Amino acid sequence: MLNPRRLSTEIDALRWQEAGACREADLRLFFSPDGDEDSGTERAAERRRRLRQAIRICEQCPVRLVCRRYALENGEKFGVWGGLTETERRRIRSQAHEERHDRLRSAESLGEAA
Ligand code: SF4
């Protein structure tokens, strides 16, 4: 069931998007026509050109860091967010996952030693 209070909170949390530099840009620069950056019919040279243009817009965006954090925290799979490509975000999430795993393993081995 729709919770109006929760919906309102979520909308407030996304207000930063109104200040995004991409609001005036061609959003096709930010998303692959194939959905996934690493597959489909978009040629590599075209993809590099598109991503460069999108990242250039992000570099001038006043909410870049908020956008980046939002995308990482919410597991946004597609598109350029906060100047990071899909591949870069995947790599960051994977590193963070491994680091968490390593910390847990260290904590467990400390517990076993005690
Ligand atoms: S950082 Fe990039 S994707 Fe995010 S709001 Fe700004 S321009 Fe848009």
Image (cartoon, helix red, strand yellow):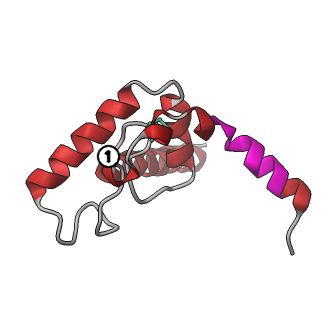
Residue 63 visible in rendering: yes
* Disc 1 CB within 8 Å of nearest ligand 1 atom: no
- The region drawn magenta spans 7-16
Q: Residue at x 48, y 31 (%)?
A: 64
Location of residue 50 with respect to 16 vertically, above or below = below
The amino acid pointed to by label 1 is Glu
Location of residue 19 with respect to 33 vertically, above or below = above
**Observer-nearest of 28 and 72:** 28
Rendered location of residue 104, percent (x, y): 53, 49
Residue 109 visible in rendering: no
Q: Residue at x 38, y 54 (%)?
A: 79
Residue behind mark 1: 88
Question: Is residue 12 in the magenta section?
Answer: yes
Q: Residue at x 58, y 32 (%)?
A: 19
Rendered location of residue 98, percent (x, y): 41, 50
Q: Residue at x 22, y 69 (%)?
A: 39
Task: Report crowding for label 1: few under 14, some 14 to 19, many 20 or more residues within 10 A (C-alpha).
Answer: few
Look at the numbered disc 1 and give the secondary structure of its residue.
helix
State left or right for residue 91 relative to residue 64.
left
Predominant secondary structure, magenta span: helix
Which quadrant would residue 40 be assigned to in this image?
bottom left
Question: Number of numbered discs present?
Answer: 1
**Observer-nearest of 95 and 15:** 15
Rendered location of residue 14, percent (x, y): 67, 44
Rendered location of residue 11, percent (x, y): 74, 49
Question: Is residue 38 in the magenta section?
Answer: no
State left or right for residue 71 relative to residue 94.
right
Q: Quadrant of the C terminus?
A: top right
Q: Quadrant of the N terminus?
A: bottom right
**Observer-nearest of 103 and 114:** 103
